[in-house]
Image: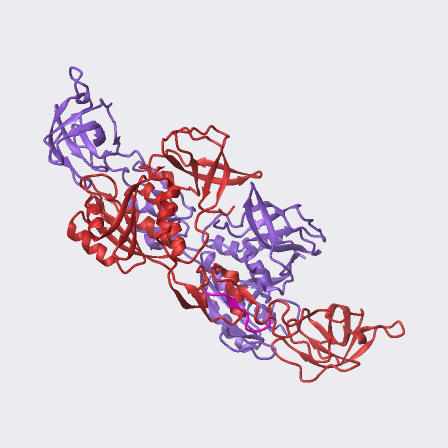
Chain colours: A red, B purple
Amino acid sequence: MLSVEEALERILSEIHPLSAIQVPLAEAVGLVLAEDVIAGEDMPPFANSAMDGFALRSQDSQPRDGQPPRLRVTGSVAAGYVAEHAVEAGTAMRIMTGAPVPPGADAVIQIELTNYDGPQSTWVEVLQAVAPGNNVRPAGEDMRSGQTILRQGSEIGPWEIGILATLGKAMVPVIRKPRVAILGTGDEVIEIDQPLAPGKIRNSNSYLLEAAVRHAGAQPIRLGVARDTVESLREKFSQAMDSDLILTSGGVSVGDFDLVKNIMAEQGEINFWRINMRPGKPVAFGHIGSTPLLGLPGNPVSAAVTFELFGRPVLRKMAGHTRLSRPQVEVVAEDGIRERASRRHYVRAHVEWRDGRFVAHTTGKQGSNIMTSLLNANALVIVPEGGVEIKAGETAQALMLDWPEV
Amino acid sequence: MLSVEEALERILSEIHPLSAIQVPLAEAVGLVLAEDVIAGEDMPPFANSAMDGFALRSQDSQPRDGQPPRLRVTGSVAAGYVAEHAVEAGTAMRIMTGAPVPPGADAVIQIELTNYDGPQSTWVEVLQAVAPGNNVRPAGEDMRSGQTILRQGSEIGPWEIGILATLGKAMVPVIRKPRVAILGTGDEVIEIDQPLAPGKIRNSNSYLLEAAVRHAGAQPIRLGVARDTVESLREKFSQAMDSDLILTSGGVSVGDFDLVKNIMAEQGEINFWRINMRPGKPVAFGHIGSTPLLGLPGNPVSAAVTFELFGRPVLRKMAGHTRLSRPQVEVVAEDGIRERASRRHYVRAHVEWRDGRFVAHTTGKQGSNIMTSLLNANALVIVPEGGVEIKAGETAQALMLDWPEV
């Protein structure tokens, strides 16, 4: 049996980032930058006022004979406009936050430290002396023209979107989003809006994986369920081949009736692995033509967990990320984990941060057929190989699948 | 000045969850359930085999005269099909994982513990005695008909999608996604694909907020930028009124040129607050007609931070969530925070989990005009009111905005 780490390493060694494309800024969130982003201008592009107040020459703010100086107001500058004339000795201009500091002025005094006669006042009394540069944000204080602001390979979050907008990047070079064909298999699987018939179960995997693929930042394409016939399987695989990844569920275990393995082997180069983990021992990986294929177990719990451990890192690598795996933290297993397994056991659990530590509660019975073990789980507690028991209150490592709102 | 907590409480007291709608299952991920989900059938719906092997009567597995018993194989059951006849004394049926256990059989022996003569074998030798129920998953083991599986108010993640699919919920009752009209204001703001002109800056807030609204699970509608004229503002507000929330940026501070405040006050009931925080002191909240309006500062850093503190909880409450705010953890401020502020300071930082604790690094200069302070930030370190200094290595509370991949 392969270890989880060996299997992941083998898979990732055959996965490469996809090509770069240009997308409109609003579509870039969540994607990875394909090139460095360099500022084309200083930001802010001009010295501007940090306050509503009056722009003046700082030396004119000094008291005269112990009295606040009174300056003549020669005009005003609103944000978005430029002054019509310079500030000269003995004068000031009203100025709004963000407006360009007029030529001649080297400081701004905030409105709260002045006396004046309403919005149209022709004079202002300066109640406090100010130093040069007071309330002035210099051009280029935030970013300098030519400076590298964002690095190739970094993920674009909402705040990076704001910075790209400021820099005028209406189109952004990104690694394109992987397209993932999702294929269920098995004559027992019926569509979700069909009534159950004897021996049948509903197609939960395709919907679960579609949502998980979307959460991983990729674009799912649900192809439905292949019947257990050569024709049906060949047809579905041919539909899937123009995607970036084919994700199947079912048909990768040892059963005689598993045609899927044969068709996979016929149409491509696929390795069938037994992985030292529970749930989810059987996993397949290889290529159909030149398209990578990841074959997950048919059991929904196994499909969910193996997607997290193998599918998500594959999609992240394709999308250009360099950080591929979920964080691991130490948790206190408050209720313990008594179910022993010889394989490494990924126990579904709900973890919360309480009193300075992470506390884990398992989600109930952990059989790979117990789908309700997925409910409310935000972590996988890792029980090492070899039938280890974790007693109540002992610590364990956990993969954090989410960081919950509190 | 209001505290952040007071302001948030006043805002949330006027926000209510939106109406419930039915959406197709694939569109339900990330939304909140509007009703309890009750299992309509047992799951699994029938007793089925946990292994590939042979279905038999457990008493027939006992050795006879110290020899493994040999049973007659009368047929086979594949997943998705039902047996054509019962298992009788002295017989067995080949069975695949997930296939219904045929009548008469009370156990399955896995294929590895048998001898047989290939796929068409008419006999099987049973190498180990098995107990009743061996490798049989009983009907209803996972879920019982009538059992409440998911509660109203819970968020639907990828794994819950799988469970809803299994239960045949092709349409799901959810709280609908909030529609958020995003409106920039100010004559200084130009579109992102325009060259900079004197006094102008680009419209970063609308794009930043659009991405942040989408990340918060809501649907953004970018309305562009209102000019500083009564007509332009009135027109934009009228376009925004059929949304669930109007989100503005700019125009809520004390400046004389801020028409926005006047138009807001004319068209609705709006409170203008000074909040004891940095960045982002001025925030407006109220209604235009019956539509809630949240007015954020114009400065991009302030807009980003106030959206996190006020906008995101508003959208989560509208979407039916009961957990509204980001988690707070204790972090070690590795490089300290020397910039003192009399208001509570939300310092942008990158936090990582290292050696059993959270370690925070600030993102550089923290002026509210320094947009690059948003780069690579995944947390806001909270420096309490009153000019507190946090020395290198001291601890502080931080709001975690993200839980990063490692």
Image quarter of residue A214: bottom left
Q: Nearer the viewer, residue A75 or B261?
A: A75
Q: Is residue B292 visible?
A: no
Above or below — where is B63 with respect to B296? above
The magenta stretch is A35-43
Q: Nearer the viewer, residue B33 or B400?
A: B400
Query: At 48% across and 53% down in the image, what residue appears?
Result: B316
Image location (x, y in percent) of residue A298: 27, 43
Above or below — where is A384 with respect to B307? above
Describe residue B155's horizontal placement relative to residue B81 as left or right. Answer: right
Q: Nearer the viewer, residue B310 or A326?
A: A326
Q: Main secondary structure of the magenta part?
A: loop
Query: At 29% across and 56% down in the image, what residue appears?
Result: A291
Q: Is residue B372 highlighted in magenta? A: no
Image location (x, y in percent) of residue A243: 30, 59
Image location (x, y in percent) of residue B28: 37, 53
Image quarter of residue A2: top left
